[in-house]
């Protein structure tokens, strides 16, 4: 809902494209690269938890623009922050997805898991449009950040189930 909000707030379309597209993409790639490096130091589940918290904060930070703070510098900063931490979280999530692939059909297993991520993202986009239209952008971004935190107890619980199944500490 960032793009529609920025359009509704009157930001220039070129600025939106550069901030969210080019700059955001570079930040996302940097986040994914560093996420892969930090993943080894933090461990899979610690990384997923930490990066998940950062992502919830980054998503909810868009409330700054929703509440009327003006300036393209904020848009660039928030875009870089959100895309960077999304890259971190993606590296952690996709690594865990790869861990759950059977060696005899790893390509199929990974493709199914990635397809589920895409389908959930599409559903999230639909729900976010309804949410922002119903409660407004500011509350929508706050709710989105809080909802991101709801996943953390499940990740925490799954860590121990995974650890017991695999027999190694992660």
Image (cartoon, rainbow, N blue to C red):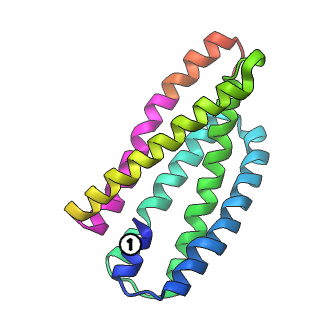
Residue 152: image location, x then y, percent: 47, 37
Q: Is residue 121 visible?
A: yes
Which residue occupies 70% across, 67% down?
Answer: 26
**Image quadrant in which the N terminus is located:** bottom left
Q: Is residue 79 above or below residue 58?
A: below
Q: Secondary structure at mark 1?
A: helix
Which residue is under mark 1? 4
Left or right placement of residue 21 versus residue 123 in this view? right
Residue sitting at 63 percent across and 46 percent down?
90
Residue 144 falls within the magenta-colored stretch:
yes
Q: Crowding near pointer 1: few (<14 within 10 Å), some, many (20+)? A: few
Residue 20 location, quadrant: bottom right
- Please tell me which residue lies in front, 31 or 103: 103
Q: Residue 114's spot in the image, x, y percent?
A: 60, 37
In the image, 5 versus 63, the foreground residue is 5
> Would you identify the image quadrant in which residue 22 lies?
bottom right
Going 59% across and 48% down the picture, which residue do you hit?
51
Q: Is residue 45 magenta?
A: no
Say which residue appears at 61% left-offset and 80% top-offset. 18
Position of 101 with respect to 158 (left or right) is right
Residue 53 versus residue 28 in the image, above or below? above
Count how many numbered circles sit on residues in the image: 1
Identify the image quadrant of residue 134.
bottom left
The answer, for residue 170, to whether it is visible in the render is no
Magenta residues span 136-155
Which residue occupies the foreground of this view, 48 or 105? 105
Residue 123 vs residue 157: left or right? left
Look at the image and tell me in which quarter the C terminus lies.
top right
Estimate the x, y position of residue 127 in percent, counting from the top left: 32, 51
Q: Main secondary structure of the magenta part?
A: helix
């Amino acid at each position: 809902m960032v793009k529609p909000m920025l359009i509704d707030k009157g930001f220039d379309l070129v600025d939106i494209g550069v901030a969210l597209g080019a700059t955001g993409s570079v930040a996302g790639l940097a986040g994914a690269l560093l996420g892969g490096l930090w993943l080894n130091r933090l461990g899979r589940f610690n990384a997923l938890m930490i990066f998940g918290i950062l992502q919830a904060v980054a998503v909810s930070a868009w409330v700054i623009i929703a509440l009327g703070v003006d300036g393209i510098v904020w848009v660039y900063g928030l875009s870089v922050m959100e895309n960077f931490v999304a890259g971190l979280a993606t590296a952690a999530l996709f690594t865990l997805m790869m861990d759950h692939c059977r060696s005899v059909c790893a390509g199929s297993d990974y493709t199914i898991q990635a397809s589920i991520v895409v389908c959930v993202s599409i559903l999230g986009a639909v729900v976010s449009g309804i949410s922002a239209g119903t409660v407004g952008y500011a509350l929508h971004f706050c709710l989105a950040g809080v909802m991101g935190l709801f996943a953390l107890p499940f990740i925490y619980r799954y860590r121990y189930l995974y650890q017991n199944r695999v027999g190694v500490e992660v």
